[in-house]
Amino acid sequence: MQYLDFIEMPVWQKANEVVEQVYTICSKLPKSEEYALSSQLKRAALSIAANIAEAFGRSHSKDKINFYYYGRGSAFEVRNHLIVGCNLKFFTKEDIVDIDAACKDIVEALNKIIKGLNSKSS
């Protein structure tokens, strides 16, 4: 499907939801984590949506693919930080299940976009 703006993309919309969920869950973190886990988790979540937007704005398929890969990597980074938060007993598994699932959905969607772009450039 052809989109006129990145905000129309379901994958960006889901990434934006992850940002909102991450900011909410970070409010559970102690003040001592403000510049550590909280900051890293927020930055990674913001990076997913930002990289999808940046990919949308690129003209060349190879550039687009690189930024979609960066967004994909950031989704994995969010998942990692959530697991660390659970291991440190800041979050419960129930706290993170929806965000983790959304990140997995984003990775799957980005994989499809990347595959489509690769097949066009071959």
Image: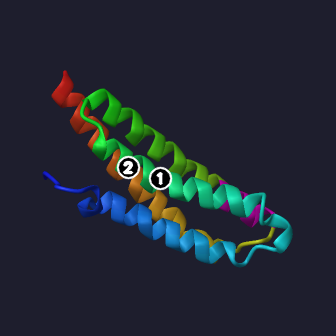
Circle 2 is placed at which residue position?
Answer: 52
- Residue displayed at 68% across by 55% down: 40
Q: Residue at x 58, y 69 (%)?
A: 22
Amino acid at the residue labelled 1: Ile
**Residue found 34% across the figure and 31% down from its top:** 63
Answer above or below: position of 87 versus 72.
Answer: below
- Residue 4: image location, x then y, percent: 16, 55
| Image side of residue 103 versus residue 59, left or right | right
- Region in magenta: 81-88
Label number found at residue 19 = none
Q: Any magenta on residue 30?
A: no
Secondary structure state at the residue bearing disc 2: helix
From the viewer's side, name the closer residue of 3 and 73: 3
Quarter of the view holding residue 97: bottom right
> Residue 63 vs residue 39: left or right?
left
Query: Dot 1 lies on which element?
Result: helix
Q: Residue furthest right?
A: 32
Tag 2 and tag 1, C-beta contact below 8 Å: yes
Q: Is residue 98 visible?
A: no
Residue 46: x %, y % from top left:
52, 58
* Residue at the spot of label 1: 48
